[in-house]
Image (cartoon, coloured by chain):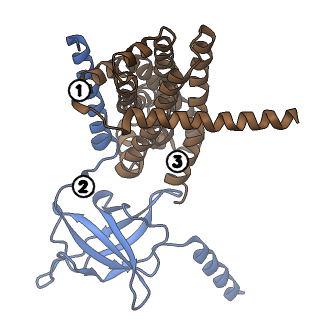
Amino acid sequence: MTSRKVEIGVGLFVALAFVSLLMMALKVADQGMSGNGETYNLYAKFDNIGGLKPRSAVKVGGVVIGRVGEIELDPEDYTPVVTLVISADYRDFPDTSSVSILTSGLLGEQFVGFHPGFSFDGIETLAEGDFIADTKSALVLEDLIGQFLFSKDNDE
Amino acid sequence: MEFFAKLGRSTLNAFATTGRAFFVLVGAIIARPQLIKNTPLVIKQIYIVGVQSLLIVGVSGLFIGMVMALQGYTVLVDYGAEDSLGPMVALSLLRELGPVVTALLFAGRAGSALTAEIGLMKATEQLSSLEMMAIDPLRRVIAPRFWAGVISMPMLAIIFSSIGILGGHLVGVDWLGVDSGSYWSIMQASVDFNDDVLNGVIKSLVFAFVVTWIAVFRGYDLVPTSEGISAATTQTVVHSSLAVLGLDFVLTALMFGTN
């Protein structure tokens, strides 16, 4: 009933479709960072996260070391708590490290800049579940303009 | 009075057609599907509607990707944002153009052929002969063609999108000089597998269902004359194109509208 040519054709067709789907998954959508590979979570409290979104990058000096996981509001003091999902390849950051929310370029998307602190003797390293104490919030343009006008008023 | 009679007649006709369309659908796929017995027939139909549509789908995908890269580049370069070419090409292909253009091409290439084939079977009374031999033509003729269409089109759409993205790479990176690394990496940062790729596949599944249904129903339901076959083939292409474009808006609003 079904000739060999038909079977080969359908087989190639299905294989091509799978290759395309695989290309979508690996090359186009990149499941790499969040999908597989070991990670650990750090937490950071900000006053204002600006336009930060889940899956934004976490960078040290421009190198992506992880992604933003969940963003939630702390029910007690109403400040945003950001979960940073860091790749397990990058561990043992000192306790004195700081994070700030930065913008790539003038109109680019926002990411979390991670600044490793100095490590002295007796400084502990960050591990799963730790809070990063030293945080700098996102710059909100309206606040900046407000401060500028306010300081100008004071000068006169 | 004549006006009301006309209005009533066309309303009743519309309802009767919808009813017959559901009858064909239920008879072909829902009532007692014979998976094992029908598999060779389905494979043969996948070859006819799917594999033989590969050429037109592949070539259209390549050129649509290339044209989008070219057009997108001329606009984006004014803002120094030509690095965003990758996500622009990938997102518009995955979310919209892949499913929609594949469905339109499929309606023209395979849907019209299905209608004409089934219609000629009806006109030459092959369907009646099958019934004389106690073989249900809905299950022997309609069901394999229906399943072949539903299976083939999502695969064609995903092939269309990947070839289009490679075509965009060809023009954007190899010809216009966008950096290859940023083409892929910014694309990876902004395309989400579940939100974009899978939603595109779901879209093309819905289109596949609708287009194949219209095609087989128009063939099964036509007036068995030469005019009837030509009218039904035209109706297949027109109705499935309209249905695809209308449904696309609804699906886009549901999937991407609220965020």
Q: Find the residue positioned furthest to the bottom.
A: A76
Q: Position of residue B79 (x, y in %)?
A: 58, 45
Q: Which residue is found at the position 67% from the left and 88% from the top?
A: A154
Q: Tell me if label 3 and label 2 are in contact, CB under 8 Å.
A: no
Disc 2 is placed on an element classified as helix
Q: Amino acid at mark 2?
A: Gly
CA–CA distance in space, label 3 to label 1: 35 Å
- The tag earlier along the polypeptide, 3 or 1, is 1
Q: Which residue is mark 1?
A: B37
Q: Which residue is mark 2?
A: A35
* Mark 2 or 1: the one toward you: 1
CA–CA distance in space, label 3 to label 2: 27 Å
Question: Quick check: can you spot residue B79?
Answer: yes
Q: Nearer the viewer, residue A137 or A87?
A: A87
* Mark 3 or 2: the one toward you: 3
CA–CA distance in space, label 2 to label 1: 40 Å
Which tint was used for chain A? blue
Disc 1 is placed on an element classified as helix
With B88 as the anchor, is B169 left or right in this view?
Answer: left
User: How many residues crowd around disc 2 within 10 Å: few (fewer than 14), some, or many (20 or more)?
Assistant: few
Q: Which residue is mark 3?
A: B251
Q: Nearer the viewer, residue A37 or A140?
A: A37
Marking on residue B229: none
Q: Position of residue B40 (x, y in %)?
A: 24, 21
Q: Find the residue positioned furthest to the right.
A: B1
Q: Which chain does the numbered disc 3 sit on? A: B
Q: Amino acid at mark 3?
A: Leu
Q: Position of residue B96 (x, y in %)?
A: 51, 39
